[in-house]
Amino acid sequence: MDLIHQIEDPIVEQSEGYFEANSDLHVTIRITVDFFHFLSAYQEIPSPREVDYVCGTIRSGMDMFFLLAYSCYAINTDFRTWAFHCEMPVTYKDLRASFFEPIRACVKTRT
């Protein structure tokens, strides 16, 4: 099973039909997995061309991400759930580490 389905399938199953055939969810997960693969492929800082490409990929899905976030807010209205971490990674190495951890945890819970 590919990584997209390893993340998406449990969400759809556990949402009791709420996310059935939700393209916002699918596109958001697909772009997240694309970024995961990008970070996996580049151990060192990637070229500006590669960075521009992945930024374009992320920008292409921003509308769907916000639509997904809005629909999720209907499920859980506790503001604390939607709080962002205050500290952003400073180095590329820190960015990779902070991004890999939740993806791996999500996949690990499924296996």
Image (cartoon, rainbow, N blue to C red):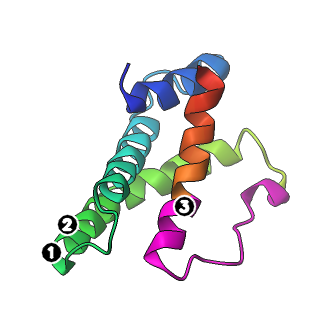
Residue 5 image point, x, y percent: 42, 25
Magenta residue check for 91: yes
Residue 23 image point, x, y percent: 39, 35
The residue beneath circle 2 is 53
Count of numbered badges drawn on the protein: 3
Q: Are marks 1 and 3 in contact (CB under 8 Å)?
A: no
Residues at marks 2 and 1, CA–CA distance in whole angstroms: 6 Å
| Discs 2/3, front | 3
Judge whether residue 18 can be spotted in this image.
no
Which is more N-terminal, label 3 or label 1?
1
Q: Quadrant of the C terminus?
A: top right
Q: What's the residue at 27%, 64% (across, down)?
A: 54
The amino acid on which the numbered mark 3 sits, given as a three-letter code, is Ala
Residue 45 image point, x, y percent: 31, 75
The residue beneath circle 3 is 97
Which is more N-terminal, label 3 or label 2?
2
The amino acid on which the numbered mark 1 sits, given as a three-letter code, is Arg
Callout 1: helix, strand or loop? helix
Q: Residues within 10 Å of mark 2 (few under 14, many from 20)?
A: few
Residues at marks 1 and 3, CA–CA distance in whole angstroms: 22 Å
Q: What's the residue at 24%, 66% (across, down)?
A: 56
Can you say whether 26 is above or below 100 in the image?
A: above
Is residue 101 left or right of 32 when viewed as pictured? right
The magenta-colored residue range is 79-98
Callout 3: helix, strand or loop? helix
Q: Are marks 2 and 1 in contact (CB under 8 Å)?
A: yes
Q: Quadrant of the N terminus?
A: top left
The residue beneath circle 1 is 49
Q: What's the residue at 40%, 51% (across, down)?
A: 36
Callout 2: helix, strand or loop? helix
Judge whether residue 61 can be spotted in this image.
yes
